[in-house]
Image: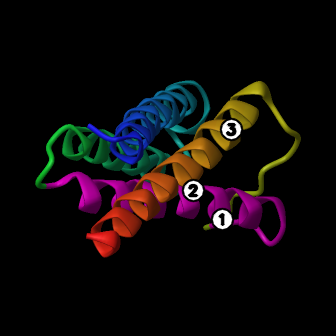
Amino acid sequence: MGRGDALATAAYALGAISLGGEAAVHVQQYASLLHEVRWIGPLFLANAAGCLVAMIGLAYGRTRALAALAGVVISALALGSLAVSYGHGLFGWHEGGFRTAIAIAVITEMCSVILLSGALTTAAVRRHAH
């Protein structure tokens, strides 16, 4: 395994861990705060489910690139949705303040986007070089 392969593998693995953290925060926030909020509560569960599916896909070589792309999209949409909820609101929900759970969600979502995008880029560059 070359250095580029090792870096991509590490980025995929760390991206999967970040997705796991994102899923955990979304489930925790659903259970403690958002379980009765129409649209937003179910979207938090959908985010967690999507993260779990992407994590499983990252474990297999055949599905790794698609799963990484899905993880990037899921996390980027979560970040964008949070930004919208602070401004105009999202499906009637207006976020207020910056709780610890939100900070953890932002960190895990940003890590997922950066790590999985980096892994995809590394894999694409290696394919193009061959």
Q: Is residue 75 above or below residue 49?
A: below
The amino acid marked with disc number 2 is Ala
Q: Could you tell me if residue 54 is visible in this image?
A: yes
Q: CA distance from mark 3 to mark 2?
A: 12 Å
Q: Is residue 44 magenta?
A: no
Residues drawn in magenta: 63-90
Q: Earlier in the sequence, mark 1 or mark 3?
A: 1
Q: What residue sits right under mark 1 in the picture?
A: 80
Q: Could you tell me if residue 38 is visible in this image?
A: no
The residue at the point 78 percent across, 50 percent down is 95
Q: What residue sits right under mark 3 in the picture?
A: 107
Q: Is residue 69 above or below residue 20?
A: below
Residue 78's label in the rendered image is 2
Q: CA distance from mark 1 to mark 2?
A: 5 Å
Disc 3 crowd, CA 10 A, few/some/many (<14, 14-19, 20+): some
The residue at the point 43 percent across, 52 percent down is 119
Disc 2 crowd, CA 10 A, few/some/many (<14, 14-19, 20+): many
Disc 1 crowd, CA 10 A, few/some/many (<14, 14-19, 20+): few
The answer to which of 10 and 41 lies nearer the viewer is: 10
Q: Which quadrant of the structure image shows residue 55?
A: top left
Q: Is residue 54 left or right of residue 35?
A: left
Q: Nearer the viewer, mark 3 or mark 2?
A: 3
The amino acid marked with disc number 3 is Ile
